[in-house]
Amino acid sequence: MGLVGWGRYARHGLDLSLRDVLFGGLACGWLWRRDRLEAEVLGLCSVGDEALVCYSVRSGWDLWLRAQGLLAGEEVIVTAVTHPDMVKIVQGHGLCAVPVDIDPETLAPRLRALEAALTPRTRVVLVAHLFGGRMELGPVARFAREHSLLLAEDCAQAFQGPEAVGDTVADVSMYSFGTLKTATALGGAVLRVRDRGVLCRMRGIQASYPVQRRGSYARKLLRALGLIVVSWPRPYALLALVCTRLGYDLDSLVNGAVRAFPPQVAEARFFGCLRHRPSGPLLAMLSRRLGTFDSGRLARRASAGERFAGRLRMATVHLGGRSLLRTHWLFPVVVADPEALIADLRDRGLDASRATSSIRVVEAPAGRPSPTEASLMMSGVVFLPAYPELPPQALDVMVDLVDSCASPVARESVTL
């Protein structure tokens, strides 16, 4: 029997209310001044004329690379665990993505791996802050400066409020407001760009893009409404039961519902999807979410995650346990038998998955070392529900089950 009788808590609590969805629906029928809304969004983030609003982080990353004018065959060092589309964009520009291993406890790149990846063709270092925490950028920034490299930080999973956007040591800082993200607007991104010349070129390129269709944004709102309703414990349990009876994969269904861009499409279509400007309704929603940012909920989420982490017998089973400013957008653990833990949690009314996030390990190009530490880490990962709406007894159940699965094999997988 589950924690709520016949019900199941979803793996991820959407940071969006029914009122927000209603606002978005009304916004689709209003004529907006897009330039005024964009200025409003940037003003709320206190970034002034150092930033721009993009359709998504992937759109902004593509735009930034276009503005840099890098040459085919040049290299971008990337932290070994990231969203595969970020790598796809690198490769689409004729560049080579070279992964470097990360420390499972801090989720920061290993300095020795950065040094080993460096070649005369290296031009950029891209780091991803994972799971709601931040890595210490100082060592990576020093490495980048010493070798005259550009430093890009992907903060898609690490938004911690509009008053803290961008690290001063990064050349570009990218924040996402996609469906599963903190303060979601169901799309949109804010990029803080340090080089004014690059920012000007980015604005010029983006001005040539078509604007997102209002109908496209309206469909996202409808999907979000469905996700909010179905993520309540009883409807979610019913969805899981239906999937089991009909032979559907629940993970694929849920992940497909929140995916921003179609997977496995031709490169031309992929970049065509990226290269849009955010619509007026999306900008209006983004302004609303930033202007009404719920710092209290973020603090409760961080507190719930810290309480859970503090009760685990083996601290090393928690990925990113020594990262900075942890807000626990996701709570990943590494265990010896991930499938057994998932099954036990679901039997007790708690959803968990190995695929809550689309991030994965970057494959090394021919002749370059594979990120073995990251691969081993991700081979045993399970993403747990840890949002503040979970009842206290849910954390009790998860602590017991994770501790029972955290064999020495799990410890080896995260400490090597």
Image (cartoon, helix red, strand yellow):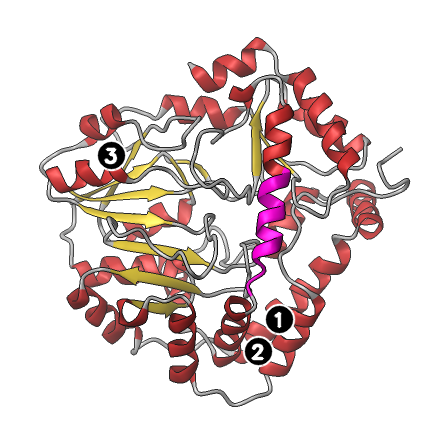
Which element type, helix, strand or loop, lies under badge 3?
helix
Q: CA distance from mark 3 to mark 1?
A: 43 Å
Kindly report the secondary structure that dominates the magenta region of the rendered protein. Answer: helix
Taking the image as drawn, is residue 266 in sight?
no
Labelled pair 2, 3 in contact (Cβ < 8 Å): no
Amino acid of disc 2: Gly
Q: Earlier in the sequence, mark 2 or mark 3?
A: 3
Q: Quadrant of the N terminus?
A: top right
Q: Quadrant of residue 198?
A: bottom left
Q: What percent of the width, then of the height, locates residue 323?
A: 43, 34
Q: Earlier in the sequence, mark 3 or mark 1?
A: 3
Q: Circle 2 is placed at which residue position?
A: 215
Amino acid of disc 1: Arg
Residue 64 lies, with reference to residue 345, above or below; the image says below
Residue 201 lies, with reference to residue 129, above or below; the image says below
Q: What percent of the width, then of the height, locates residue 190?
A: 39, 63
Amino acid of disc 3: Pro
Taking the image as drawn, is residue 172 in sight?
yes
Which element type, helix, strand or loop, lies under badge 1?
helix
Task: Tell me which segment is drawn in magenta.
Answer: 293-304
Q: Nearer the viewer, mark 3 or mark 1?
A: 3
Q: CA distance from mark 1 to mark 2?
A: 6 Å
Q: What percent of the width, then of the height, locates residue 19?
A: 69, 71
Q: Circle 1 is placed at which residue position?
A: 219
User: Taking 176 as reference, is 354 left or right?
Assistant: right
Q: Nearer the viewer, mark 2 or mark 3?
A: 3
Q: Circle 3 is placed at which residue position?
A: 139
Q: Nearer the viewer, residue 352 or 215?
A: 352
Q: Quadrant of residue 402?
A: top right
Which element type, helix, strand or loop, lies under badge 2?
helix
